[in-house]
Image (cartoon, rainbow, N blue to C red):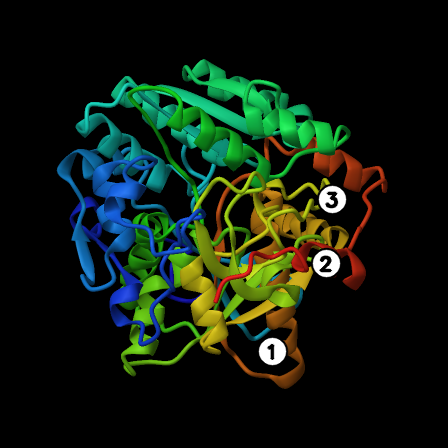
Amino acid sequence: MSEIPYKIYLNEKEMPKAWYNVRADMKNKPAPLLNPQTLKPMTADELEAVFCSELVNQELDNTNAYTEIPAEILDFYKMYRPSPLIRAYFLENELKTPAKIYYKFEGNNTSGSHKLNSAIAQAYYAKKQGLKGVTTETGAGQWGTALSMACGFFGLDCRVYMVKCSYEQKPFRREVMRTYGASVTPSPSDTTQVGRKILAEHPNTSGSLGCAISEAVEAAINTDGYRYVLGSVLNQVMLHQSVIGLESKIALEKYGIKPDIIIGCAGGGSNLGGLIAPFMGEKLRGEADYRFIAVEPASCPSLTRGKFAYDYCDTGMVCPLSKMYTLGAEFMPSANHAGGLRYHGMSPILSQLYHDNLMEAVSADQTSVFEAAVKFARVEGTLPAPESSHAIKAAIDEALKCKETGEAKTILFGLTGTGYFDMYAYQKYNDRQMTDYIPTDAELQESLSRLPKVD
């Protein structure tokens, strides 16, 4: 092995002390959220009926490049941060590629994923505001687990609406949330008006993140002392997750390493946005250049087959409208095993960057994704989450291209979490029962044809 260590660790003094807001350097800012009734830009007062006040400020801030991380959050981060940056020597050897592969490992905490970076921040601001509790949705369960941990730490009530297929496939993830004090409801449910409406229209639905968001928002609005929090998509979440990219950049620069290609899985966009943030900032300012690749499931391909338009953020159409790459709020993705990547739209920030040709996007079917996951697990020793495995697949593909051309490119990807609660999915793969459903153009057009009319 070379002089570059297998794992690059930062010490506490090297940890970022502020989050980076990539919007400050974007020439074309993300379009504003729109009020679903008036179709006018949402004001801070309107947003504060749903979100915590300080989070609203972060959501609307397009100008300040950095936001200081409160001391209480920094102290919590020290339980599991800085997270390691790992050189994938064994994967490189297996592929016989001249490429150098690094991954930022975000699964070294009890929640098992990067989601805790924003969960603790949002719980902190809720506690600071004097709230009783928060509501949220979760897909595969990583976000719900992280938020239940954060709420338990600050003594807040936590109510989670979990996409029904994940609720049924991942009972142990559900029990971790309950252990930390959260209540968990399969979505869509009969506990909310919007849930009952969706069940009446789609009685056999396996649910979607859009459905769960609608229920969580309704519950928050109708419960005194509660606010809604979200684990992806929103600007505020991209801000908190920038700690991933900031740490990665500091660690690489310690050894004079500059990545050529940066890869992340993409559902709502939180981990990808966080990983690429400081590198994208350099690209936007003209200081350096990188290739950024978003990898999404072929069963829910918002970037690669969606439309850049205003759409509802939720299936129940009670949330603000966001301009993003979308498949339509009524799109019901198949019950694929990458539950955290089953959202119909993409972060407005990432959507704008993609629209401006500053990043690329590819999709992958889940059988090939699990093939990459198993290869990685066998040589690198960590069982990856299905979501993260999309990034692994793309990293392997890029490394094999280097093998063909002889180029020794440096690849960085995000390993967002572990797959130890995803054994039902691995069982399906091992038993060769995994399927690869990809929506037809006609199916996508059906949902896209019902996009709201916004001038």
Name the spot of residue 209 as percent of width and height, x first.
57, 39
Q: Residue at x 34, y 77 (%)?
A: 283
Residue 187 figure quarter: top right
Q: CA distance from mark 1 to mark 2?
A: 35 Å
Residue at the far right: name it: 432
215 or 410: nearer the viewer: 215
Provide residue 103's location: percent of width, then percent of height: 47, 56
Label total for image: 3
Between circles 1 and 2, the one closer to the viewer is: 2
Residues packed near mark 1 inside 10 Å, few (<14), some (14 to 19) or many (20 plus): some
Name the quadrant containing residue 6. Answer: bottom left
Amino acid, disc 3: Ser
Residue 59 can be seen, yes or no: yes
Q: Residues within 10 Å of mark 2 (few under 14, many from 20)?
A: many
Query: Alpha-carbon distance for marks 2 and 3?
Result: 12 Å
From this viewpoint, is residue 110 visible? no
Amino acid identity at mark 2: Leu
Task: Give yes or no for contact between labels 1 and 2 (Cβ–Cβ under 8 Å).
Answer: no
Residue at 80% x, 61% y: name it.
442
Mark 2 sits on what residue?
A: 444
Relative side of 383 to 433, left or right: left
Question: With respect to residue 133, does 336 lie above or below?
Answer: below
| Crowd tier of the residue under label 3, counting other residues whose Cα lies within 10 Å: few below 14, some 14–19, many 20 or above | some
**Residue 33 x, y percent position in the rendering:** 38, 54
Label 3, on which residue?
334
Q: CA distance from mark 3 to mark 1?
A: 34 Å
Question: What is the secondary structure assignment of the residue under circle 3?
Answer: loop
Residue position marked by numbered label 1 in the rendering: 402
Task: Looking at the picture, tell me which residue is in the foreground, 135 or 116.
Answer: 135
Q: Nearer the viewer, residue 288 or 147?
A: 147
Image side of residue 136 versus residue 11, left or right: right
x and y, in percent, of residue 312 in the image: 52, 49
